[in-house]
């Protein structure tokens, strides 16, 4: 079925760990830091108001949609400047608090056992639109090459981001199997770029009607192993 596959590449958030609990903890750590070090900011913004303001800020520049770290630093600069703080050191320190907390992920139980086994037969990679760092989260010994949207200034589902991973491995796109939870970014996009794709559906979600149904669907990485050996 997948005889020509040499590379298995993964999305990160909501494929290898649940995303929102990680982001919520990081947001809480950031807000606590701001409350202590920059109280004029948190006196102006509740956590909820800050979140909504950041959503609106993201819409101001297309770069923010592909570089989440840039977006957060610039938003923190804006908050600091509004509150009368020196914006550059506040933005840098506050971002580091968020970024370090953002790397503290809780992997799904199947991740390390299955990736360790897969690594014996395949080379492993990753593609992400987010700002999780493969090395910092603890996957550096398993993932050989990774690309992210901020690095390339191109986000999934742009074909170039998938082709870039193939170039880093030195293989053809049809030698890569991509696994991820997002229907467009992790299935439709890779397929249109020439990769193979498997939909990771850990939460039993419905597939969007406006896309052709996925050929392969799994609920966990153990099922991926079964699929690869079928």
Image (cartoon, grey):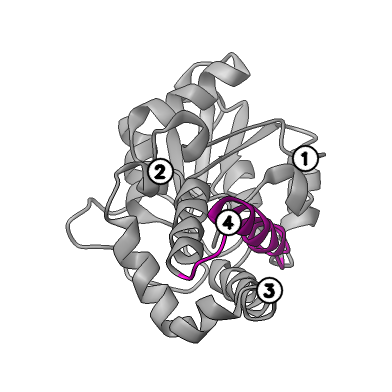
Q: Report the span colored magenta.
A: 83-106
Residue drawn at the location 60% of the way across and 51% of the way down: 224
Q: What separation in Å lies between label 1 and label 2 (alpha carbons)?
A: 25 Å
Does 25 appear above or below 207? below
Q: What separation in Å lies between label 1 and label 4 (alpha carbons)?
A: 33 Å
Q: Residue 194, image x and y in percent?
A: 37, 27
Earlier-in-chain disc, 4 versus 3: 3
Q: Would residue 132 be counted in the magenta stretch?
A: no
Secondary-structure class at tag 3: helix
Residue 142: numbered disc = 1
Q: What separation in Å lies between label 1 and label 3 (alpha carbons)?
A: 38 Å
Q: What separation in Å lies between label 4 and label 2 (alpha carbons)?
A: 19 Å
Residue denoted by label 3: 37
Residue denoted by label 2: 66
Earlier-in-chain disc, 1 versus 3: 3
Q: Are marks 4 and 3 in contact (CB under 8 Å)?
A: no
Nearest to viewer (mark 3 / mark 2): 3
Taking the image as drawn, is residue 45 in sight? Answer: no
Does 159 appear above or below 108? above
Q: Few, some or many C-alpha atoms within 10 Å of disc 2 (few <14, some 14-19, many ≥20)? A: many
Residue drawn at the location 49% of the way across and 56% of the way down: 77
Nearest to viewer (mark 1 / mark 3): 3
Taking the image as drawn, is residue 206 in sight? Answer: yes
Residue 52: numbered disc = none
Residue denoted by label 4: 91
Earlier-in-chain disc, 3 versus 2: 3
Q: Residue 70, image x and y in percent?
A: 49, 46
Q: Few, some or many C-alpha atoms within 10 Å of disc 3 (few <14, some 14-19, many ≥20)? A: few
Earlier-in-chain disc, 4 versus 2: 2
Secondary-structure class at tag 2: helix
């Amino acid at each position: 079925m997948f005889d020509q596959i040499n590379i298995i590449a993964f999305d990160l958030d909501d494929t290898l760990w649940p995303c929102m609990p990680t982001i919520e903890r990081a947001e809480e750590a950031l807000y606590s830091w701001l409350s202590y070090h920059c109280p004029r900011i948190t006196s102006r913004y509740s956590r909820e108001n800050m979140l909504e303001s950041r959503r609106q800020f993201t819409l101001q520049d297309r770069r923010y949609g592909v570089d989440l770290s840039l977006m957060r630093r610039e938003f923190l600069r804006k908050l600091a400047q509004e509150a009368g703080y020196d914006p550059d050191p506040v933005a840098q320190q506050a971002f580091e608090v968020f970024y370090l907390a953002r790397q503290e992920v809780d992997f799904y139980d199947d991740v390390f056992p299955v990736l360790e086994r897969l690594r014996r037969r395949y080379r492993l990679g990753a593609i992400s639109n987010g700002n999780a760092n493969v090395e910092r989260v603890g996957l550096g010994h398993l993932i050989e090459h990774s690309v992210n949207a901020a690095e390339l200034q191109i986000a999934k589902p742009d074909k170039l981001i998938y082709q870039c991973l193939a170039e880093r491995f030195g293989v053809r796109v049809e030698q890569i199997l991509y696994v991820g939870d997002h229907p467009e970014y992790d299935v439709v996009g890779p397929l249109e770029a020439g990769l193979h794709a498997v939909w990771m559906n850990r939460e039993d979600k419905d597939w969007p009607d406006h896309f052709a149904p996925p050929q392969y669907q799994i609920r966990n990485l153990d099922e991926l192993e079964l699929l690869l050996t079928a």
